[in-house]
Amino acid sequence: MAQLIRLLLPIVVLATGYLGYRLLSEKEEKKMPLRPVSRIIEAEASLLQKSDYRVTLFAQGIVQPHNQTSLTPRVSGRIIKISPNFESGSFFNRGDVLLELDTTDFLSARTSAEARLARADAALVQEEARAKQALLDWNDLGYTTEPTALVLREPQLKEANANVKAANADLSETIRDLERTKVLAPYAGRVKTRMVGLGQSVNSGTTLGDIFSTDFAEVRLALSGRELAHVTLPNNPEDPPLPITLVDALTDESNQSWKGMVVRTEGTLDERSRKLFVIARVNDPFGLKTETEGPLRIGQPVRAILDGSIIPDVFIIPRKTLRHPDEILLINPEDSTLKRQKITPIWTDKENLIVSADLIEGWHIVTNRLAAAPNGAKVKIIKPEAQEPKAALKEKPNPAA
């Protein structure tokens, strides 16, 4: 037994030493730091260049008619006729007869007025004859003094003349009332709503319906103080109008647009928003006299596009290049290193930020997203990868087929 132990002891010592050496070697390897591997960042970029930028202003509004009227008759009566042009949505011209009232009572009133005028004329003729006869009688009696006004029946003549004038006025009034039994269109327009029916009795204050003019429509648009600095508006009647484009706001899929002009501005700022309202006009909104892409209906919401001033020598920064709300990534062309740059835009729109300072022409701006972008990192500019066209969606079979 002792002999066996003496034989195995050297083997155990050797094994123990080997295991200790392995453990110590692995521990030392873990303590050794990893050697850093430098990597060049690949980025898509575009050249920074100054250019002129045209400011485009956007606003929204509702189409309103230039004239809108609640139509009322000027006399009372019973409706006996309604024109086809006086239906909801119908068009009419200026002077068209939209509605007629019963004329029986007005014809009787005219006949009575004509009779009163005839009696007044007859009474005036008689008084004139009496005045002449009174002057003859005065001379025949041999009076040497001038006859008085009473002798010449001047008061009676004045009364007879006044009666004739009053009768004429009554006749003119009855003729006007007879003409007013026909309700005429005050302008060329369209019927919004008709509120009365055939056979209905109406008074002089009864609303027959609502109508509006079709010569042109107007849109009230709000512009902020920041926007007003980039546009010249017509403030006086002699100022030239400003072109504007209106686009249908009911749906984004519509391609309809209408050309108009900003013709005037309101004199005061809105108390709540501190914005100035301008009035844009569109001639012939329904295309009655000119060809249009489609009618511009009253009450329709529209988006307005207005060309503003030109800002010279600025950098146009696309929004998609922003890494943070106010930060972009630049590439120094001298050493191809990356630099984070904060920007302060002087104007913004839906797609771009306009910057006039803090940028250097000739540098590059990174246009794609980078996972890591430390300052001073080496950058290699690459071309944008071509996007593969999306595969067309397979048409699902129709179960009903």
Image (cartoon, rainbow, N blue to C red):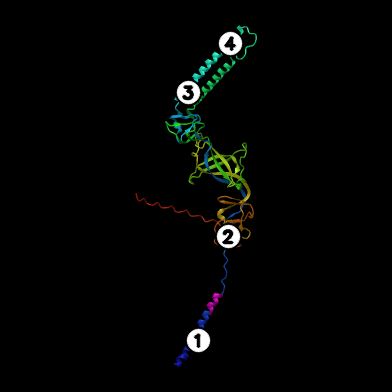
| Residue closest to the eye, 160 or 318 | 160
| Residue closest to the eye, 289 or 278 | 278
Name the residue: 56% across, 12% down: 130
Q: Which residue is mark 1?
A: 13
Neighbour tally class for label 3: few under 14, some 14-19, many 20 plus, Cα within 10 Å: some
User: What is the magenta range?
Assistant: 24-31
Mark 3 vs 1, N-terminal side: 1
Up/down of 79 relative to 349, above or below: above
Give the label, 1 or 4, closer to the camera. 4
Distance between mark 1 and mark 4 Cα atoms? 176 Å
Neighbour tally class for label 4: few under 14, some 14-19, many 20 plus, Cα within 10 Å: some
Task: Indicate which disc residue 171 carries.
Answer: none
Q: Which residue is mark 4?
A: 134
Give the label, 3 or 1, closer to the camera. 3
State the image coordinates of residue 140 (x, y, percent, origin top left). Answer: 60, 6
Q: In the rendered structure, are the residues bearing label 1 and label 4 in contact, judged by CB atoms less than 8 Å apart?
A: no
Q: Is residue 188 left or right of residue 339?
A: left
State the image coordinates of residue 334 (x, y, percent, origin top left). Answer: 63, 59
Residue projecting furthest to the left: 401
Q: Main secondary structure of the magenta part?
A: helix
Name the residue: 50% across, 85% down: 14
Amino acid type at circle 2 is Lys
Rendered image quadrant of residue 78: top left
Q: Which residue is mark 3?
A: 109
Name the residue: 46% across, 22% down: 108
Distance between mark 2 and mark 4 Cα atoms? 126 Å
Q: Which residue is mark 2?
A: 380
| Residue closest to the eye, 358 or 114 | 114
Amino acid type at circle 3 is Ala
Distance between mark 2 and mark 1 Cα atoms? 59 Å
Distance between mark 3 and mark 4 Cα atoms? 37 Å
